[in-house]
């Protein structure tokens, strides 16, 4: 081991941070061979890029590095891995670490209630609020287990912000502001916003199971989870809400009447950034997945997730899983759930084209009549 030969060591390793502002890394680096240049390197365990920063050492080897987390955002509750490296006077490269810490959102004083498998955290609300959240988590997991395996090893954490602004300011969602919650499934963390209120239990029973579903889907599918179409992932998560959003039904009816439904083909990669259309995307996905569950059962839903996790595209995944391509499933859903007559819809969609087609046919006929009559005039 080079470390052993050079005696390179990092001691008094210490971290302090203000979430969203700065992270301070402290350590004392010592080596039996003089240190030419020391570095610190760190990254969130799920990040692709490692930050490498040269350090200034004091005479006693102590070093302090402050990272500006307001400019270069790190996801909340991410586990951060860091290590110290050095180039020595004999050109040897040495390292100490890795060390780990979790970058909690410490802007708030969190209360915690845990049953050993699920921990709920909140900062606004009494003990009954926390109990309602934990009950919602347990009931949600019970529901999810009807369709997917539930894995609580390692345990999962649910963080309940008191309002949407607190939640959004904690996230690096990059435009994904349409969700009332967010899950970071690979670290087993769900985040959502529920304020203490008369309806807190219902709100919690809707949002906690939703975020837990994202985490359980990830645990059941592994990396293939990232290949799930958005409509399927969000549709399943919305379906597992114990109190589904009652306004989804009217949103669907209105869009169906106005002929403004979004096609699932357009909801494969992401949902619209526009919040109104995103809302409709959730309503449609929830209704569609519910329809698929009623038609093909739990095994159909599981087969769908597996086909997509295997990397099949949006159309073909459905074909392999249930024998019907996505666009045909969508037609059946529109007919069965929304009572649409697809021949009608097709005609309505084609109407502008039929008018143009009509015009392009009529214009030459008029032209021909014109020529004909002119000809006749000439004959006269
Ligand atoms: Zn979701």
Image (cartoon, helix red, strand yellow):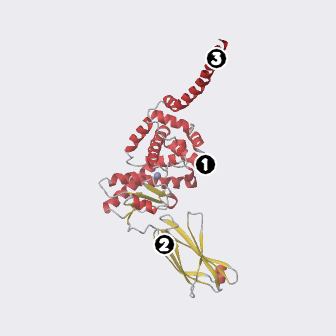
Above/below status of 213 relative to 119: above
Residue carrying label 2? 22
Q: At 47% from the left edge and 35% from the top edge, which residue is drawn?
A: 334
Which of these two is toward me, 250 or 380?
A: 380
Which of these two is toward me, 81 or 69?
A: 69
Q: Residues within 10 Å of mark 3 (few under 14, many from 20)?
A: few
Q: At 58% from the left edge and 83% from the top edge, which residue is drawn?
A: 57
Asked if marks 2 and 1 touch (Cβ < 8 Å), the reply is no
Query: SS of the residue at dot 3?
Result: helix
- Residue situated furthest right in the rendering: 90
Residue carrying label 3? 372
Residue 311's label in the rendered image is: 1
Query: SS of the residue at dot 2?
Result: strand
Q: Nearer the viewer, mark 3 or mark 2?
A: 3
Query: SS of the residue at dot 1?
Result: loop
Q: Nearer the viewer, mark 2 or mark 1?
A: 2
Give coordinates of residue 60: x percent, y percent.
Answer: 56, 87
Label 2, label 1: how far apart the Cα atoms are: 39 Å
Q: At 59% from the left edge and 25% from the top edge, which residue is drawn?
A: 363
Q: Earlier in the sequence, mark 2 or mark 1?
A: 2
Label 3, label 2: how far apart the Cα atoms are: 84 Å
- Residue situated furthest left in the rendering: 198
């Amino acid at each position: 081991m080079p470390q052993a030969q050079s005696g390179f060591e990092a001691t008094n390793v210490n971290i302090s941070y203000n979430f969203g502002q700065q992270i301070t890394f402290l350590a004392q680096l010592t080596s039996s061979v003089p240190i030419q240049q020391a570095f610190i390197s760190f990254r969130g365990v799920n990040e692709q890029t490692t930050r490498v920063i040269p350090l200034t050492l004091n005479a006693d080897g102590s070093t302090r590095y402050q990272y500006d987390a307001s400019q270069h955002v790190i996801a909340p509750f991410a586990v951060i891995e860091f290590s110290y490296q050095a180039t020595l006077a004999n050109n040897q490269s040495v390292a100490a670490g890795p060390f780990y810490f979790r970058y909690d959102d410490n802007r708030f004083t969190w209360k915690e209630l845990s049953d050993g498998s699920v921990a709920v955290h909140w900062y606004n609300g009494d003990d009954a609020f926390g109990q309602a959240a934990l009950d919602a988590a347990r009931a949600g997991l019970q529901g999810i287990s009807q369709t997917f395996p539930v894995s609580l090893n390692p345990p999962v954490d649910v963080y309940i912000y008191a309002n949407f602004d607190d939640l959004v300011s904690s996230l690096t969602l990059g435009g994904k502001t349409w969700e009332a919650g967010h899950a970071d499934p690979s670290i087993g963390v769900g985040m959502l916003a529920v304020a203490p209120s008369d309806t807190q239990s219902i709100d919690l029973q809707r949002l906690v199971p939703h975020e837990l579903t994202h985490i359980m889907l990830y645990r059941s599918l592994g990396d293939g989870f990232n290949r799930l179409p958005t409509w399927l992932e969000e549709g399943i998560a919305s379906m597992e809400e114990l109190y589904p959003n009652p306004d989804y039904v009217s949103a669907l009816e209105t869009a169906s009447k106005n002929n403004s439904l979004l096609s699932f083909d357009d909801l494969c990669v992401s949902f619209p950034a526009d919040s109104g259309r995103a809302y409709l995307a959730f309503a449609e996905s929830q209704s569609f997945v519910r329809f698929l569950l009623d038609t093909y059962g739990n095994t159909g839903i599981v087969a769908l997730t597996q086909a997509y996790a295997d990397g099949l595209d949006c159309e073909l995944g459905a074909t392999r899983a249930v024998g019907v391509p996505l666009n045909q499933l969508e037609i059946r859903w529109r007919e069965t759930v929304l009572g649409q007559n697809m021949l009608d819809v097709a005609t309505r969609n084609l109407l502008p084209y039929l008018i143009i087609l009509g015009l392009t046919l009529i214009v030459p006929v008029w032209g021909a009549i014109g020529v004909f009559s002119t000809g006749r005039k000439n004959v006269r």
